[in-house]
Amino acid sequence: MIEPSTMPSNSYSLEEVMDNSYDSIFVTDAVGNILMANPTAERLLNLTITQMVGRNIRELVEQGHWDKSIALEAIEKRTTVTGMIKTRDGINLMCTSRPLFDSQGNITMVISNSRDRDTLVKLAQTLDKERELVQRYKEEVQYLREQGVKDRHLVAESTAMKNLLLEANWVGPTESSVLLYGESGTGKEILAKYIYSISRRAKEAFITVNCSAIPENLIEAELFGYEKGSFTGADAKGKPGLFELADRGTIFLDEIGEMPLVLQAKLLRVLENGEVRRLGGIHSRKVDFRLICATNRDLKKMVEHKTFREDLFYRINVVPLQLAPLRDRPEDIMAISDVLLKELNKKYGYDKVFSTETLKGFLNYSWPGNVRELRNLIERLAITTRGRVIDYQVEEMSYPPGNRAAGSHQEEKGTMRIQVKAKAPLKKVMSQVEQEYIKNTLQDCQGCVSEAARILGIDRSAIYRKVQVVQLRDQD
């Protein structure tokens, strides 16, 4: 490969560099004699190293191995030269030749490296496509963030909501922790997203965690992440936690009152130290996120009953905001109904309107499920009403037809009848009764798993395990 007389003492390491270079490399002396070449030059120029070393470049050009020599131009101009050459096989090479000088200013050698131009063009095209894809993803993420606020109907016609938004606008651009209070379905998550959208972190991640929807044995791994092999069933590569994913952004802990006491202590350490440690890990990672929490529970009473840590309560209750139930803000009932119906009309090509009696019924109804219940009802009415005018009787609104769990129906207040198959094994009957009773309790609680678990005296995880319900949730 290289003539021994021209090689330095560390020739073996130099050969390794040459042999493993992706570029074609060859070296000539001051008059164009080839001193060394690497395997890539051999492949691109279609000449063996033996055919190149010891020969002059002019000779190879004259024989048509390539159309010209950039190295000879560099020798003639005594400076670095870059240009295109074409090989006998029609390969276009981007070549750069750089002369080296001794202390007297004489050229000692010229180092030339070449790369297939088509490969460079393809690489540049691939990079351009990747840049376009990244830009598109950024635009899509930004669009989804904006839609996450726009599509969830943050309507404020009542004095209570207008005052609440004034407070939200004041606290949004700050870094303070916010605690949102309100019944299930009042729109706590919508307000959290609004606060995020006007914050300094609006271009970063917004991570939502429903503390009541994740089983207790999994929530720590979800929040803190885990290292590979930390427990049975763990991902072989490990997994970052939601706290890590929220770094530089905002994390929204919904139903914070359902978080187990043990995990509350770990959350407090994260908030105080700004560090998380994955399950099975030995190193802590720095995290910087803004915290927004929400609850439908009375956390002060929970603190008194020792079911919620007092120190964590004071840490998250920096700026408390209270969302009033829908029944206390009738102006918003009308405004939200109008917005929702207009969107459904646009989505499905309808031209539907509410009758006066329907709107009166909306105002007289107590809306235990708040905005969520209103939204779901209006969607159902818009889809199922055949005519243009939606006419719905208020007395139907407590339990719309077909909305109860199969195999059961309500009797007088405080009682429940459950139908079971005759001549079935006792174990199967007991299992069916248990499932139907849990479903009925969930229905009474408007799908709130936490409240149902409290009434039944069982853990939330037991409800998820025993009953398969599509809309089993606690979120706003």
Image (cartoon, rainbow, N blue to C red):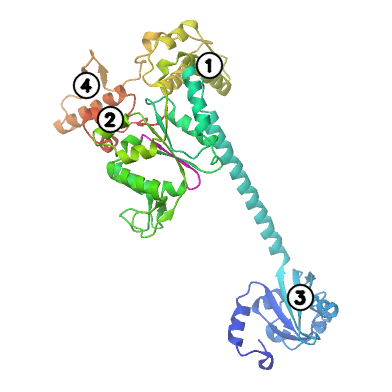
* Residue identified by numbered label 2: 301
Give the class, few, some or many, for how many residues have Cα within 10 Å of label 4's Cα (few <14, many ≥20). few
* Residue identified by numbered label 4: 419
* Residue identified by numbered label 3: 97
Is the Cβ of the residue at disc 1 closer than 8 Å to that at disc 2?
A: no
Measure how far apart labels 2 and 4 are at the Cα level. 39 Å
Find out whether residue 254 is within the magenta segment.
yes
| Magenta segment boundaries in residue numbering | 247-255
Give the class, few, some or many, for how many residues have Cα within 10 Å of label 2's Cα (few <14, many ≥20). few
Q: Nearer the viewer, mark 4 or mark 1?
A: 1
Q: Which residue is drawn at the image coordinates 32% and 41% (left, top)?
A: 311
Q: Amino acid at mark 3?
A: Ser
**Is the C terminus in the top left, top right, bottom left or bottom right quadrant?**
top left
Location of residue 443 by image quarter: top left
Give the class, few, some or many, for how many residues have Cα within 10 Å of label 3's Cα (few <14, many ≥20). many
Q: Nearer the viewer, mark 2 or mark 4?
A: 2
* Residue identified by numbered label 1: 338
Q: Nearer the viewer, mark 4 or mark 3?
A: 3
Find out whether residue 121 is within the magenta segment.
no
**Nearer the observer, 318 or 200:** 318
What element does badge 2 sit on?
helix
Measure how far apart labels 3 and 2 are at the Cα level. 79 Å
The disc, 3 or 2, on the residue closer to the chain's N-terminal end is 3
Q: Which residue is drawn at the image coordinates 29% and 28% (left, top)?
A: 451
The disc, 2 or 4, on the residue closer to the chain's N-terminal end is 2
